[in-house]
Image: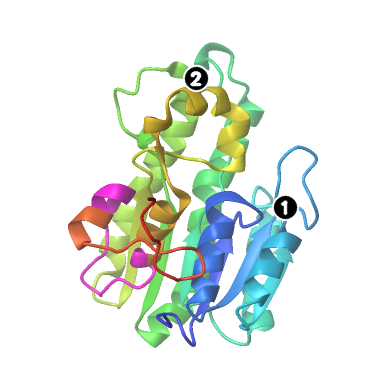
Amino acid sequence: MARFEGRRALVTGASRGIGAAVAERLAAEGAAVAITARTLEKHDRLAGSLQETAGRLERYGGAVATIVATLADEGDRQRLVPEAVERLGGPMEILVNNAAGAMYQPLADFPLRRRRLIFDLNVHAPIDLAQAVIPAMREAREGWVVNLSSATARLGQGSSTMAIYGASKAALNRLTDGLASELRGTGIRVNSIEPRAAVRTEGAIEMVGDLLRRQPDLLESMEQMVEAVVALCACPKDVTGRIAVSLDLIAEWGLIVHNLDGTELKPAT
């Protein structure tokens, strides 16, 4: 598969989890990929690092740019796209806004500092990066922006501890809808995608690993989530403004789920 041959992509939050997996799949299908996260080397608690992700991507033979950046910092957000352009030798054609911050606690005593951090990471960073890639995409008359969202954005989720995180993702969905409407007809597609079930990432295991082990039916595979994300990284011009759900999109489009290296995923026997 060489669906992204000659394309340049930027994936945030790519030291582990969905971001690292999406970056690998894009590289496996021919893209030059810029990856970013806060730290280059191993996290003090979680498995995975930018160095490890870069090592996996380099096996596919394409260009890889590793950029350390803190997306809560406005200065880092401003330098990220220009640095990716310089390192990969041209403008970004695909932007995957995967990086996010999640802190869960009751609203009655949720500190302002934490609220601001969540909205900086989950709302301001995606729109700042989108604004940075749009001019070149508009000139080329094509481009793909994919925002990673969450089911917690919907009303009626119950738990107040997820309300701030969910509110930030609801804002991201609304920005997705608004930006898609604004750019309709330019060739730039803007969509968001959320998992229908939990994806077994390092962060999810750290936070709710016991629940996932007790109820495996709450899980979807990393390969399923990535299949849906990369489908939106190559969708036609009329697919824009979608607030999609991973497994639903796979069923709707009849997608075949692949391994992260692009080979077809064989069903378990």
Tag 2 and tag 1, C-beta contact below 8 Å:
no
Q: CA distance from mark 2 to mark 1?
A: 25 Å
Residue 150 image point, x, y percent: 40, 40
Q: Is residue 135 left or right of residue 252?
A: right
Residue 226 versus residue 62 in the image, above or below:
above
- Mark 1 secondary-structure assignment: loop
Q: Which residues are magenta?
A: 231-249
Q: Earlier in the sequence, mark 2 or mark 1?
A: 1
The quadrant the N terminus occupies is bottom left
Report the colour scheme.
rainbow
Q: Quadrant of residue 86?
A: bottom right
Q: Is residue 237 left or right of residue 86?
A: left
Q: Is residue 234 left or right of residue 45?
A: left
**CA neighbours of label 1 inside 10 A, class few (<14), some (14 to 19), many (20+):** some
Residue 8 image point, x, y percent: 53, 79
Residue 25 versus residue 191 in the image, above or below:
below
37 within the magenta span = no
Report the amino acid beneath label 1.
Arg
Would residue 71 be seen by someone viewing this image from the given angle? yes
Residue 26 versus residue 5 in the image, above or below:
above
Residue 162 image point, x, y percent: 47, 25
Q: Residue at x 30, y 27 (%)?
A: 155
- Mark 2 secondary-structure assignment: helix
Report the amino acid beneath label 2.
Thr
**183 or 208, nearer to the observer:** 208
Disc 2: which residue: 161
